[in-house]
Image (spheres, rainbow, N blue to C red):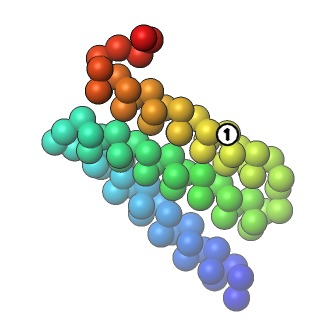
C-alpha cells in the first residue's frame, strides 16, 4: 500500500515539476517566472523527501533541506533584484 502511494506521489510531483518548468520558460512576466522557480524548488524538495522515505536514506532529507534553503535565498534575491534592480544596498 505504501509503495503505491509513493509511486503516485512521485508521479504527481514529476508532473508538478514539469508544469512549473513550463511556466518558468513561458511565463509572460518576471514575477510569474520567480514564482515558478520557487514552486520548482518546493516540488524538488518534496520529491527528495518522498524518495528519502521510499529509500530510507537520510542523505536525501539533508539534500531536501539544502534545496529548500537555497530556494528561499534565491527567491528573496531575485525578488529584491526585480524590485530595486540592485542586490547590494
* Callout 1: SS: helix
Q: Using the image as rendered, state which of residue 73 and residue 56 is in the foreground.
A: 73
Q: Which residue is mark 1?
A: 66
Q: Residue furthest front?
A: 89
The answer to whether any part of residue 8 appears in the image is: yes
At x 65% / y 54%, what residue is drawn? 48
Of the 4 image quadrants, the one containing the N terminus is bottom right
- Relative to 5, say whether 51 is above or below: above
Of the 4 image quadrants, the one containing the C terminus is top left
Q: Using the image as rendered, state which of residue 73 and residue 18 is in the foreground.
A: 73
Q: Give how far across and how far down residue 19 sits, in percent.
A: 34, 56
Q: Give how far across and how far down residue 53 sits, in percent.
A: 75, 66
Crowd band around label 1 with a 10 angstrom C-alpha radius: few (<14), some (14–19), many (20+): few
Q: Give how far across and how far down residue 2 sits, in percent.
A: 71, 82
The answer to whether any part of residue 25 appears in the image is: no
At x 44% / y 36%, what residue is drawn? 75
Q: Residue furthest top?
A: 89
Q: Give how far across and how far down residue 4 sits, in percent.
A: 63, 82
Amino acid at each position: 500500500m505504501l509503495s503505491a502511494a509513493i509511486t503516485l506521489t512521485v508521479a504527481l510531483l514529476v508532473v508538478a515539476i514539469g508544469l512549473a518548468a513550463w511556466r518558468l520558460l513561458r511565463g509572460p512576466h518576471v514575477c510569474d517566472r520567480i514564482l515558478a522557480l520557487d514552486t520548482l524548488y518546493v516540488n524538488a524538495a518534496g520529491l527528495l523527501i518522498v524518495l528519502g522515505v521510499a529509500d530510507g536514506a537520510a542523505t536525501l532529507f539533508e539534500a531536501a533541506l539544502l534545496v529548500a534553503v537555497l530556494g528561499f535565498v534565491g527567491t528573496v534575491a531575485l525578488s529584491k533584484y526585480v524590485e530595486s534592480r540592485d542586490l547590494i544596498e
